[in-house]
Amino acid sequence: MSRASDTAYTEIRGFLMSGKAPPGAQLTEEQLAEIAGVSRTPVREAVRRLEAELLLVRSASKRIFVADWSRDDIDEMFTLRQMLEGHAAYRAAQRLDGDGIEALEAANRELHAAIEGASPDIERFLTANRAFHEIITDAAASPRLGRVLAMLVEAPVVLRTARLYSIEDLQQSARDHDELIAAFRAHDPAWAEAIMGSHLRRAFHIFADAAGTGR
């Protein structure tokens, strides 16, 4: 794979993850080449990779669109996250030491701080939330699990979900994190897995209801 293809992939993926292109928006190779600063040839390879990650989709007429999902698609994505991150939390509860728990507490303090003001700082919240979940995944000590989760967790559905949260939803998310830390301190895998499951199931309903997807 060429360096230009890697550059195109990184730049286009970053563009999609930023949320600047709404779900279902049509994109052309010319637009993507301009975004990536490369010619159209490496863009084609980048698009194939992003299609494999389900971030882009191609119609029967070969037009390129930002991925959009039905309620069933979203349900499946969150169900997979629930299974995988629940398993990660289970394993992490058996492995997290004092330093790991302190790192979780630091990330969670940042997350709480992001939503304490009159207007929540969503970007700060997302950064802290990502750090919190990455500590858990790393503590699970399963490279395969980490690779599969990376594709699901980084999908734009996660970014859009956070932006659909009310302040009450954000506060509940922070409380879920508090309880996860308590489960990790107790080294209770079943408790940690259960809290992670309810945390992600709530996120699914917030997203699906706010996005107005059909049942």
Image: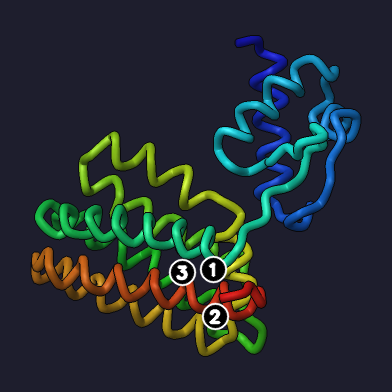
Residue under the point 21% across and 55% down: 99
Classify residue 52 as left or right of residue 111. right
Residue under the point 54% across and 80% down: 115
In the image, residue 79 above or below residue 27 = below
Mark 2 packing: few (<14 Cα in 10 Å), some, or many (20+)? some
Q: Which mark is residue 115?
A: 2
Q: Which badge, 1 or 3, comes first in the chain's sequence?
A: 3
Q: Which mark is residue 125?
A: 1
* SS at badge 1: helix
Disc 2 from disc 1: Cα separation: 7 Å
Residue tagged 3: 110
Q: State if disc 3 and disc 1 touch (CB < 8 Å).
A: no
Residue 52 or 112: which is nearer the viewer? 52
In the rendered image, residue 91, in percent from the top left (x then y), is placed at: 16, 53
Mark 3 packing: few (<14 Cα in 10 Å), some, or many (20+)? some
Q: State if disc 1 and disc 2 touch (CB < 8 Å).
A: yes
Residue 180 or 151: which is nearer the viewer? 151
| Residue 200 figure quarter | bottom left
Mark 1 packing: few (<14 Cα in 10 Å), some, or many (20+)? many
In this rendering, the label closer to the viewer, 3 or 2:
2
In the rendered image, residue 117, in percent from the top left (x then y), is placed at: 60, 85
- Amino acid carrying label 3: it is Glu
Q: Which badge, 2 or 1, comes first in the chain's sequence?
A: 2
Disc 3 from disc 2: Cα separation: 9 Å
- Amino acid carrying label 1: it is Phe
Coloring applied to the structure: rainbow
Classify residue 172 as left or right of residue 12. left
